[in-house]
Amino acid sequence: MKKHIKSIVIILCLFIPTVVLGQEIVAGYSLGSGRYLLSDLKTLQEKSVKEAQKIFENYKSTETFPEGLFHDAYFGIKFSIHEIGLKYDYLTSGGRNHLADYSGEIKEDLIVSGNALGLYYKIHFLSIPLNNHFRLTAHAGIATGAIYNRIKGKHFFNLYNPKSVFGPSYYYPEGGIITMIPNYYNREFEKIDETIKFRSTNWYAQPNIGIQLGFKNTVFLNISAGYLFDNQGKLQTANENTVNNIEDYYYSVPGKEYNVGIDWTGLRLSIGIGFAFSIAK
């Protein structure tokens, strides 16, 4: 959290001086659809399914990190044809492996979310008055900053007779790979409901273009398209993890690093509403 606060303070220090030059305060919100690469997570999920299928033939992925909606908010200053400010995006996706029948249920979820905070710049290079009230403008720009990622890995086992399924040994998903733990579970009924948390930090850049339909230069309908390039960081075990089932389970080690990244690279399309308030004398 301290790192997040420090990043925000640095961004604000860079941003505040532009207020002196400002003619308009601008703010807005958009809802968009994004494509997410997330290749490491998809590979991890695929490996987990293949290993589990050695024991459970019908085990499969039911959700594989699809593209999804993202939220975008901004606050800035516009002077002449230039605009600069702060930008926040919220991204999320997930994957699920699942099998359920009369003997029980096995489910693995990976839910990933990203909070992107950065600076943006736009240049409004075209302005066409449609009538006395409406104006059409076009802009191009770029946003850059950090993405603070969080992942929840949820493992749910509810087996009515694990001894008859596994024999003298039990298999448990460890880091996406099924690992044998001899004689650990040997009872008539077993249930596990565990949540493991991870974190990572990425740096991103997102060029974009868009158009605005403005009403009296105060309310705007925004439509934009862009492409996010993500420099992904390595995943780490979150500090708040506690694992009770296995005493020395390595997920309980805070800050443990893995050779896995969260890659949000992909196309972005969004539509939203914006507002402008004049502060010029």
Image: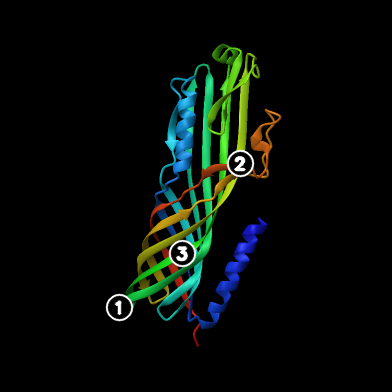
Query: Label 1 crowding class (10 Å Cα cut-off): few <14, some 14-19, many 20+?
Result: few
Instruction: Please state the horizontal and vertical placement of residue 265, each as a whole percent of the image.
Output: 43, 52
Q: Is residue 211 left or right of residue 44?
A: left
- Look at the picture and state if 82 lies above or below 184: below
Residue at position x 61%, y 38% in the image: 196
Identity of the amino acid at label 2? Lys
Residue behind mark 2: 197
Q: Are marks 3 and 1 in contact (CB under 8 Å)?
A: no
Label 2 and label 1: CA atoms lie apart by: 52 Å
**Marking on residue 129:** 1
Is 120 placed left or right of 166 in the picture?
left
Residue 153, image x, y percentages:
56, 37
Compared to residue 181, the image places residue 195 above or below, namely below
Q: Could you give the CA–CA distance between mark 3 and mark 1, rounded to whole angstroms?
A: 27 Å
Q: Secondary structure at mark 1?
A: strand
| Residue 140: quadrant of the picture | bottom left
State the residue position of label 3.
143
In the depicted view, which residue is nearer to us: 37 or 22? 37
